[in-house]
Amino acid sequence: MDSNEKVVLQADDVRRALVRVAHEIVERNPGPPAPVLIGIHRRGAFLARRLRAQLEELLDVEVPLGDLDIGFYRDDLQRRGDAPVVHASHIDFDVAGRTVVIVDDVLFTGRTVRAAIEALFDYGRPARVQLAVLADRGHRELPIRPDYVGKNLPTSRAEHVHVRVSELDGIDEVAIEASSENGSSVQSDPVETPA
């Protein structure tokens, strides 16, 4: 962790937030069938796996799990000089007529979620699409609102929110990186930022 960072959720806080989100998903989707979970690469996919384990324990049924790469659905592809980092999507079940819960780590402008919804509809037409995020930092540019939030994080646009998951980063935490005096932030580690 960099001295410009403030940890706002530690491992236990992340675990509790995901347990609460799982309970809220069950309350709003009494089923059957159980909702399906689709995590947005990269950290959203790991969070979706954890939510799946919680939901399966609560519902005592198998919960379909997929992951989605939104690299080619981004609305800034033309403006970006670098090629998107692309991961394979894995949705090995029919989403048509189902309740799909898209899972992501941080909700910021809403553009990643917009891209995920567009990508999802290439796999079929769900009955409903819901959104679960570990952290909602505000500053929306699109009319997108999460259904389930682990933690609301008031931030400035200049700050960066870093979600770290043990599967990739060796630790579970959420940190806010303060901007430096010149308005930019200094990255303390190579964390993939949300689209």
Image (cartoon, rainbow, N blue to C red):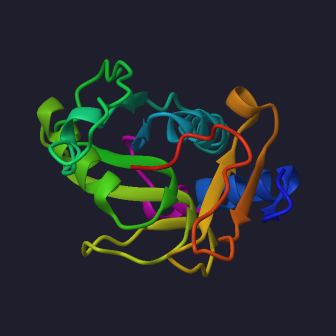
Question: Residue 33's quadrant in the figure?
Answer: top left
The residue drawn where x is 29% and y is 29% is 83
Residue 105 screen position, x and y as percent: 55, 51
Asked whether 41 or 188 is in front, the reply is 188
Q: Farthest front residue?
A: 182
136 vs 73: above or below: below
The residue drawn where x is 63% and y is 62% is 185
51 vs 146: above or below: above
Asked whether 157 or 151 is in front, the reply is 157
Q: In this view, does 146 lie to the left or right of 9?
A: left
Q: In this view, does 102 lie to the left or right of 172?
A: left
Asked whether 18 or 35 is in front, the reply is 18
69 vs 109: above or below: above
49 vs 193: above or below: above
The residue drawn where x is 59% and y is 34% is 46
Q: Is residue 82 left or right of residue 159?
A: left
Residue 116 in view in this figure: yes
Query: Can residue 22 be found in the magenta stretch?
Result: no
Q: Is residue 141 left or right of residue 21?
A: left
Residue 160 screen position, x and y as percent: 60, 63
Asked whether 56 or 11 is in front, the reply is 11
Residue 60 in view in this figure: no
- Please state the extent of the stretch shown in magenta in the rendering: 24-33
Residue 116 screen position, x and y as percent: 28, 45
The residue drawn where x is 29% and y is 34% is 71
